[in-house]
Each structure stands twice: as C-alpha cells, then as structure tokens.
Image: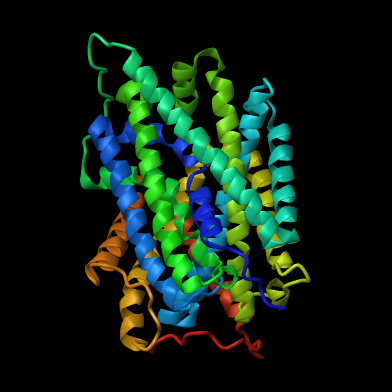
Amino acid sequence: MELRRELGLAGAVALCVGTMVGSGIFFGPQQVARELGDASLVLLAWVVAGLLALAGALVFAEYASAIPSSGGASYTFLAAAWPRPLAFLGGWTALVASYGGGVAAVSVAFASFAVRLAGHDPLARPMSVAAIAIALLYFLAFVNWQGLRHGSRVQGAATALKVAAVAALAAGGLWAAAAVESDAPAAPAEAAHLTPLVFLAALVVPIFAYSGYIAAAQMGDEVRDPRRTLPRALVLGPLAVIGLYLLVNVAYLAVLGSAGLANSSLPGYELATASLGEHGGTALALAVLVSTFGTTNAILMAAPRVAFALAREGLFPPALADVGARGTPGPAIALVAGAGMALVAAGLALRPVLGRPLFEFLVMVEVFAPGLFAVLIGVGLLRLRRARPDLPRPFRVPLYPVLPLAWAGTMVAVAVALVAQRPVEAGIGAAIVTSGLPVYAWMTREPRRPARPQAVAAPA
C-alpha cells in the first residue's frame, strides 16, 4: 500500500510549529545568557538563529517543491544531489542524533514536569520519570500507528494549546515587567571574553529550539498538493515561531534581567512565578507538559518517514518500508519510539556519569552532527539546479545562490565552534555520523538488495 495524502496546510504548519516549540525555550535561554552576558547580545543570538532557521526553511522549501517525497529533508534531498553513501549518512544521522536523542530528551522533559506537577522532585524519583516518559512514547506511537489523521488531530490540538500557553507566559512576563518600577537597571551578567567562536557556540541552544522546521518536509508523500503546501508550511512555521521566541526572551530579560537569567536553573518556572504569583509554577508546569507532549508527537510523526525512505531504497531492512492497512509505516514508527524508550532508560542511568544535564548534552550532540550536512544540503541545491533544470520548481529560494551558501557556511561555522568549545560533544556527534558507515556497508553488501529507483538521480 502507499502512504495516504491526508495532511493539509494547517496540519503541515502545525507540524512545523509543534516540532519547533518544545523544551528548548524553557530549558535553554539561561545558557545563552551565561555565555553572552549582555541582554542585547542574548536577543541578537535568538534573532540570528531565527534567521538561520528561516534561511534553512527556504532552502528546504525549494527542495520540497521539486521533490515532494517522504524522508525528504534527511535522505531524499541529499540523494538527489549527492552520491548514495552521503545521502544514507544524512538519514542515519537524522535518525540517531536528531530524532532519537531529541525524542528521548523531550519525553524526559515532559515526565520531569509531570512529576514536579504532582508535588515531587523529579531528581528524587528517576524511576517515575522513566516510566512516564516511556509511557508517553508508547501512547503517541500507538496514536500515530492508528493513522496520520489521528496523529495530525492530536498535533493540531497540542500545537494550539502550547502556542497559547507560551504566548500567555510571554504576555504575563511583559505585564509583570511593566507593572513594576525599578530604581536601577538590572546588572548585566558576566560573560567570558566575547569572540566569534563564543558567539557561534552560544547559537547552539537557539538553533536547537528552532530546529523542527524541517518536520513537514519529511512527509511529502502524505501532504495534499505537496508542491504548494510544503513550501508555504516551511516558511509560515518558522516566521510564527521567531516572533513567539523573541517575545518570550524579552519577557525573560525584562523580569529576570540578564544576570538573573544567566543564574537561573529553570528560567521559565521563575518567569511564571514572578508574573503569575504563587500559581506560576503550576501554570508553567502545565505549559511545558502541553509543549513537550506536542513536540514528542511531532517527532514521532516525522522521524519514521526517514527510516521508511531508507528502507524503500534498500538501505534499511525491507520491513521498515511496510505500510499497513491504516496507511502508516508502523514498523518505522515502532523503531523510532523504541529507540527513544531505550535512550530514556540509558540516559537516566548514565546521568551521574555524564557530569552535566542530559538535556544540555543531547542538544550539543544534536546540533553538531546534522550541522555537518548543512553544507551538503546548501551546495546540493546548486548541484541539483545545474543537473536537473527540468524539474518543476513552484518555489525558488530567494537571493540564490547567496542565501543557501551563507546558510550552509554559518551552520558549518557553528559546528567548528563546537569543536573548540565543546570537544566531547563534538566528538560524540562525529562518532554518530561515522557509525553509519558499517551499517551502509552491511546493507549494500553482495548480493545487493534490490532497491526501488530513486525519484531523482544524483548528479555525477
């Protein structure tokens, strides 16, 4: 059976926004303030990261308008522009580093706030956190296995609720800041000597917070009128989130100050307490529950399509390309959910060994590894235009070729900055990428598996 085209523009935008607005805006802003110090630099970092997300979305939008196929952003686009091994490594990195680690971290964030909402310290109840996170992954995997329409409905409702919750948090913070008169401006946070490498490394958390914009591009086979719908969703989603994130960060800085934000362990919780009084913590916990629930669902909607695309090309076991009577890639959904469950259990067990918060660790790895492939995506767009000028392109990236090259170059610069500032995380990210090489060698060994012809042949 073929995948069913049941996702319209509203569902595709909800998927983009739902994947982007997750745990990063609640857990990461203090790290940016700690590294940059000055409030204006903090806001600049979020603006720059937002513009990078928009530039990347425009690049992916042209790909999606020309090659509307499932698994596109992580495999099919690369396969259209580069040799097959590089395309496989792109899909492998997305599954293991981006989606596997991401869905584990976000589900743990959901579970931690659920335990906090119940009146307990999540650090004192690791088994409860693990059980809730695994139960969440199981439930959402079951919902998406039932059919895309069910998963899309859950995603639409969760996205509407989470955007409303985050907007209310920002509005409450700005209202509290305007209602309180301060005799002196808040002292700026102290930061290390600012260098280009420091600023680029500080972009990691905002880049992670914006990173879900490619989710809709993974589901080209299931979008109605994909050549028109996908580009519109890939632009509208990031634009909405950029505005929302800037409002939240202005509220953080207005209420907590740059020093208070830098010294905070849970800035969203402190902002809610300051703006909503004694019930602020409860309100924040509910907002994070809604946000992380929607993000976990969005990842489980998009990620299995990468495994589906790889299996369809003979690069993963054929069972992962099976589409059941419900029109969904059930085995691929089970693979991603199972990987997330395993990482939840392993991650919680290894937290004392890692020596730093698991969330921060996963963010560094997640941004570094896929960032290496940004140059292949950006330069690949130029190769694809030259090799296949006959492809229909209802959407063309503006400022071509400057915009795709500038986006790719900046993403690679961030990865290089991470090597200098966070060598352990960068090393693990590189190991994840290279670990796909033996997998590719095994799957392409003789006798070769029969592979379906690619929709677009890679240029020589």
In this picture, residue 104 sits left or right of residue 387: right
Residue occupying the far right of the picture: 325
Q: Quadrant of the N terminus?
A: bottom right
Can you say whether 339 is above or below 331 in the image? above
Can you say whether 163 is above or below 371 in the image? above
The residue lying at 45 percent from left, 60 percent from top is 233
The residue lying at 47 percent from left, 85 percent from top is 456
Q: How is the image coloured?
A: rainbow
Residue 425 shows in this picture:
no
In this picture, residue 306 sits left or right of residue 235: right
Task: Give residue 121's position: percent from left, percent from top.
Answer: 64, 23
Query: Which image quadrant is residue 172 in?
Result: top left
Residue 103 shows in this picture:
yes
Nearer the observer, 294 or 77:
294
Nearer the observer, 339 or 320:
320
Task: Give residue 414's position: percent from left, percent from top.
Answer: 32, 53
Nearer the observer, 85 or 91:
91
In this picture, residue 308 sits left or right of residue 173: right
The residue lying at 62 percent from left, 58 percent from top is 301
Q: Quadrant of the C terminus?
A: bottom left
The residue lying at 34 percent from left, 75 percent from top is 381
Nearer the observer, 226 or 306:
226
Can you say whether 265 is above or below 418 in the image? above
Can you say whether 406 is above or below 123 in the image? below
Task: Give residue 362's position: percent from left, percent from top.
Answer: 51, 47
Residue occupying the far top of the picture: 183
Task: Give residue 280's position: percent from left, percent from top.
Answer: 53, 20
Query: Which image quadrant is residue 345 in?
Result: top right
